[in-house]
Image (spheres, helix red, strand yellow):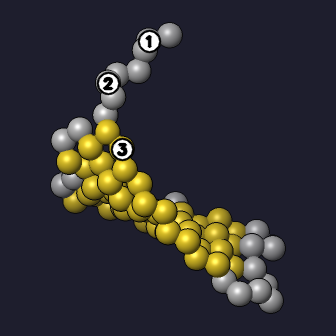
Amino acid sequence: MDKSHVNGGTLSWSVTCTTPKITVRQEWILHYHGETMGGQVTSRSTTPDRTPVESTTQLKGRYLGPCAVK
């Protein structure tokens, strides 16, 4: 994990994973509003001698209740 930040109902963080063949960086940002949340994750990957690839995925969800106790 490279960094994380909380500001009120907003949470953001980034993660970088590196191997000899590829580097992937993800940047997350989530906004919480009561029982709902929305945000996005942007992924960037680079490999030697290839064009970098970037994608962004939108996220949304809502609280469904507590998990069942096992």
Q: Which residue is mark 2?
A: 65
Q: Which mark, residue 61? A: 3
Q: Secondary structure at mark 1?
A: loop
Look at the picture and state if 63 lies above or below 61. Answer: above
Answer with the quarter of the image where residue 31 lies.
bottom left
Q: Position of residue 28 (x, y in %)?
A: 43, 62
Q: Position of residue 10 (x, y in %)?
A: 26, 57
The answer to whether the residue labelled 2 contacts the one labelled 3, judged by CB atoms less than 8 Å apart, is no
Name the residue at 25% across, 49% down.
32
36 horizontally vs 18: left or right? left
Q: Disc 1 versus disc 3: distance between alpha carbons?
A: 22 Å
Mark 3 falls on what kind of element? strand
Q: Residue furthest top?
A: 70
The amino acid type, in three-letter code, at marker 2 is Gly
Q: Which mark is residue 33?
A: none
Say what amino acid the circle numbered 1 marks: Val
Whichever of callouts 1 and 3 sits on the residue coming sooner in the sequence is 3
User: Left or right: where does residue 69 sit relative to residue 17?
Assistant: left
Which is more foreground, mark 1 or mark 3?
3
User: How far apart, in angstroms, are the residues tagged by discs 2 and 1?
Assistant: 12 Å
Q: What's the residue type where badge 3 is placed?
A: Gly
For disc 1, the marked residue is 69
